[in-house]
Image (spheres, helix red, strand yellow):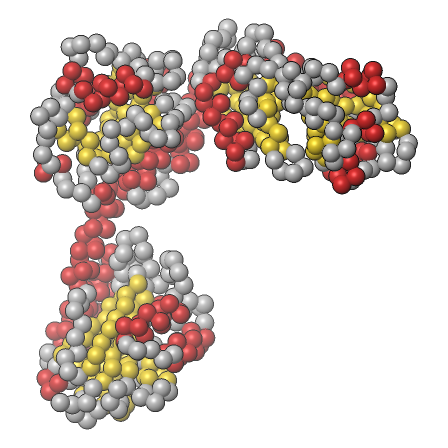
Amino acid sequence: MSAGILAVFDADMAVSVWTVAAERLWGYTADQVLYGPAEVLLASSAAEVSRFFGGSPSSGHIRIRRRNGHEAIAYLWAIPLDYDGGAGWLVWGTNASGQPGVDPAAVDAFLNHSPISLAIWDRELHCVWFNDGVHNQEIYSPEPELGGYVTDFLRARHPEYLKRAMMRVLRSGEPLLGHELWPAETRVPDCYYRVDLLRVDGSDGLPLGVCSVVVQAGTGEEGGRLHLLNEAKSRIGTDLDPLVTSQSLAEAAVPDLADYVTIDLVQPVPLHKEPLRRLKPTDISIPGFYRAGAASIHDDLRESLWARGTPVYVPPASPFTAVLETHRSHFEPVLDTSPGTWLDNDPDRARVIHQTGMHSLMIVPLEARGAMLGIAVFVRSEDPIPFSRADLALAEELAARAALIIDNALRFARGRTAALAIQRDLLPRHLSGGSTVDVAGRYLPADTYSGVGGDWFDVIRLSGARVALVVGDVVGHGTQAAVTMGRLRAKTRALSKLELPPDELLSLMDELTLDIARDRSEDDPSAFGATCFYGVYDPVIKRFIMCSAGHPPPVIVYPDGSVDFAEVPPGAPIGVGLNSYESTEVELPENTVIGLYSDGLIEMDHDIGRGLQRLRTAFADPVSSLEDLCTSVIDTLAPEGPVDDDIALLLARTHAAA
């Protein structure tokens, strides 16, 4: 076996952790050795064992005793879990001599004679073992000592970052890979390192400590800049939500660039708030922005005066308003907090700056396509190094990338708001069948983010207590489908006033839709296509006269509970121009339920036959009201989460003629 953790011996040399690797080497199972004396495992003399398991790390060949009674030579490392040796020892090892595996000399060369530095830290983050590689890297103290605390042992620009990262690894068990570290002082300009952190667990799954692996990654800030830009690129722009994009930008810059970052926008559209100009100013400040994103090295965001989604107030004369007016960054590597600055008019910010130790500031414009969207604010507090011009260039590049994404998201949000307003006006707000039928409906758009689609239903009251029931399905979904749906619904309502039979009405709909498609020949005519069902219920004769333009047949639930599908000639979709429609009729007794729907309800598994059977079963369940039946059918046939196609469902229960 290769080198690995074998066991843990406590301070009294009793076995407290036993791994599978130890079982392979010694032959004992955990039940046979746990909490027993470690001396039964070691065949060397008491003096040799005492020297090997002393107060400092040791390694070398030692004689062991296997379960079968035979003795063998193994190469072991004994690493104190506390620097004074009081907490026990972590035992590493390789194969016993005479078995195939890694040569101990090779393992020793890897551990102690490579450019990679390795260190093991106990649960309190004291160093309990390190290899010779730490002496060759400027990230460590010039004279590292066992027992040194992590922030003393490591001489990094932000030692607190690494401390918090180690604690996260200890708590979660998730490794941290590729974290950048910059030496606090270096002989090599702009030298930086990459660190991996791995939790070291015992056989019981409990953490013993953390192992750090550090390698020099480059000499030059460009490497760090590319890493941060690549990281930001993978996180920014994955969502068309301005708030999500803003938060991603803030989080991408912490902690590698700044200790605290905020993204403040001048447009409240995605936040559904009042425009800033309508908010009242205070005696010393004005509402200048809405907070869209915030990130900090502190989980409690102690630097922030304003929560996400709330207005941000600033003095009328301040770096924030200056950046907004000039479209140029504000760069203040050493933040001036002396009397006579703009902070005199912003006592709350001045208080937070002094409390948190903010000492370096950059405010960068968020500008896209010539429009100012807001500002990004970068601050350093615990990192003692002031921002450099290279940091400013990096912040501006990050802001420029994010601004385009935020602008796209804002445009999308405005379009979504407009589309929702259009659809609210186009769909019926209050369904009513008068005294002829009770009605209920549901609508589920496939485009759950924009919330708009091309399916529709309608209930139109005609003369003689008759009622027209309509359901349609426009090709596609989204804003264009919603606009087309509005046109077709308006035409259906207008033509219904002519009291035409269903087949003649759909013929006129087909002709009018085809005319529109021809007038706009540069567009795809299929964008104006739709299926449609139009039926008229007459309570006097208790008959339902209906016609279909390529739409699935309605469900009929009779008073005795039996369920059937009406036989309707399919016809061609509207906008094709075939004009081949045929009306049919069916007798509907009082208290019959008619179910009209779009094909999105029966195409969930891409098998219409199976979908129709499931629909029949769903309608067979007894319910107390049409609203409950709507809910039951949707819950049964439509899965949770996004759907592939829009879904419309219209139910009507017949009454007798008054």
Most foreground residue, 551 or 302: 302
Most foreground residue, 387 or 13: 13
Estimate the x, y position of residue 464 in percent, counting from the top left.
11, 87
The answer to whether residue 34 is left or right of residue 272 is right
Tell me where residue 509 sits by quadrant: bottom left
Estimate the x, y position of residue 603 in percent, counting from the top left.
40, 69
Residue at 34% in and 18% down: 381
Q: Quadrant of the N terminus?
A: top right
The answer to whether residue 612 is left or right of residue 278 is right
Tell me where residue 556 sits by quadrant: bottom left
Q: How many marks?
A: 0
Residue 373 position (above or below residue 384) = below
Estimate the x, y position of residue 383 in percent, counting from the top left.
39, 17
Estimate the x, y position of residue 457 in percent, counting from the top left.
23, 71
Tell me where residue 563 sits by quadrant: bottom left
Residue at 69% in and 15% down: 56
